[in-house]
Image: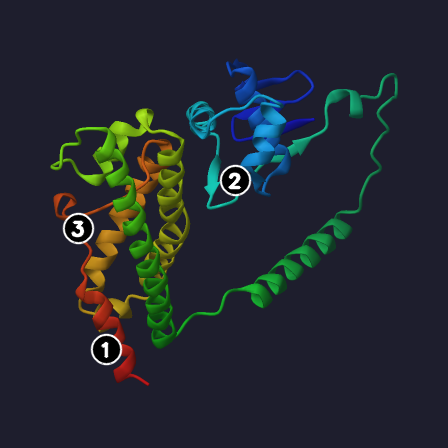
Amino acid sequence: MIYKFSDFHLDTTQNKLFKDDEPVKLGDKSFKLLVLLVKNSPQTVSKQEVMDEVWKDRIITESTLYKTISRIRQELEGAGITIESVFSEGYRVSGVVKKIMTQEHYAIKDVPTPKKPLINTKFIWLVLLFMTTATLSYLLINQKPVLTIKESIVEIRNAMSINKKAFLSQINQRNELGEMLARRFEVDPDLSWERRFFMYYDQMNEQEHFVFSQIRAYTEGPMLKNNQKILDIINSNNQILKEIPEATALRNHLTIWLNKYHRVFKNSDKMCLLYVGVEDGAPYPSIVDQQVIDWIDANP
């Protein structure tokens, strides 16, 4: 079977990964892990299943697994798919993956190509008209309803509430990991949390990597989802910028956060936190939470 994504194709019959028909060098374990995730896409594969299928009876640390995932991500840059860490579950491939049957399944030898019968032009136009009408009907039925200004701001409040709970839980685990590292290393207290964990990532033990992965799961999960949701709502309804004074500052903050996530965080296994603050020119406008609540209270 061949799995196609962007300029890459994964050939399980040849046990090779190609980019633009040129072979990509992947180690044996990296290739087996990639095949396992792609075959199960978009379903999540548990860490235990990954270890059982790829490393068989060999006992490995989670650090080895993280490094293997990181190597695959580097090789698949620009592939149009992403290997995501799923909190407390495992890993999955997200993106468009097409299955293509290998040649031996569809090759037919010595069979002459039949002549195509002439088709009436009027019939073609009728078919096109029917397809166009059906497509328009589907779009009209399935189009997403446009939210009112109140519905939009309520959705923003709900997303903020989830983000706040996730952020507070992440802070507790961040502090726990910081204390664990401080017991083993002379950590510079002036280092930012992002730099601190990035610097000591390769020296973390199995327990520290476990806490690290939990912290990262909050960033990849609820924070990414709700930050994108809030930004989409603001961008789809300019009236929000007039109703909520700090909505513009919030939009700027989220735009930079999401850009940093996709261009930096997603491509580095050594990051678990993602902060955008004063140094980025767009700190989170904390007053916006209360402004949203006050607006909802004033508009029952």
As drawn, 206 above or below 295: above
Q: Give the amino acid at mark 1.
A: Asp
Q: Amino acid at mark 2?
A: Gly
Residue 40 quadrant: top right
Task: Rate crowding at label 3 as few (under 14), some (14 to 19) or many (20 or more) other CA atoms within 10 Å.
Answer: some
Disc 3 marks which residue? 282
| Spot occupied by residue 46 in the image (x, y as percentages of width and height) | 56, 39
Quarter of the rendering containing residue 220: top left
Q: Nearer the viewer, residue 31 or 183?
A: 183
Q: Amino acid at mark 3?
A: Ala
Q: Earlier in the sequence, mark 1 or mark 2?
A: 2
Q: Earlier in the sequence, mark 3 or mark 1?
A: 3
What residue appears at the point 36 percent right and 70 percent down from the top-left corner?
A: 152
* Residue sitting at the far front: 183
Residue identified by numbered label 2: 90
User: In the image, which disc is placed on residue 294?
Assistant: 1
Which of 277 and 152 lies nearest the eye of the viewer? 277
Question: Does residue 63 appear left or right of residue 287 in this picture?
Answer: right
Q: Is residue 158 above or below residue 95?
A: below
Taking the spot 30% from the left edge, 54% from the top edge, the residue there is 167
User: Which element type, helix, strand or loop, lies under badge 2?
Assistant: strand
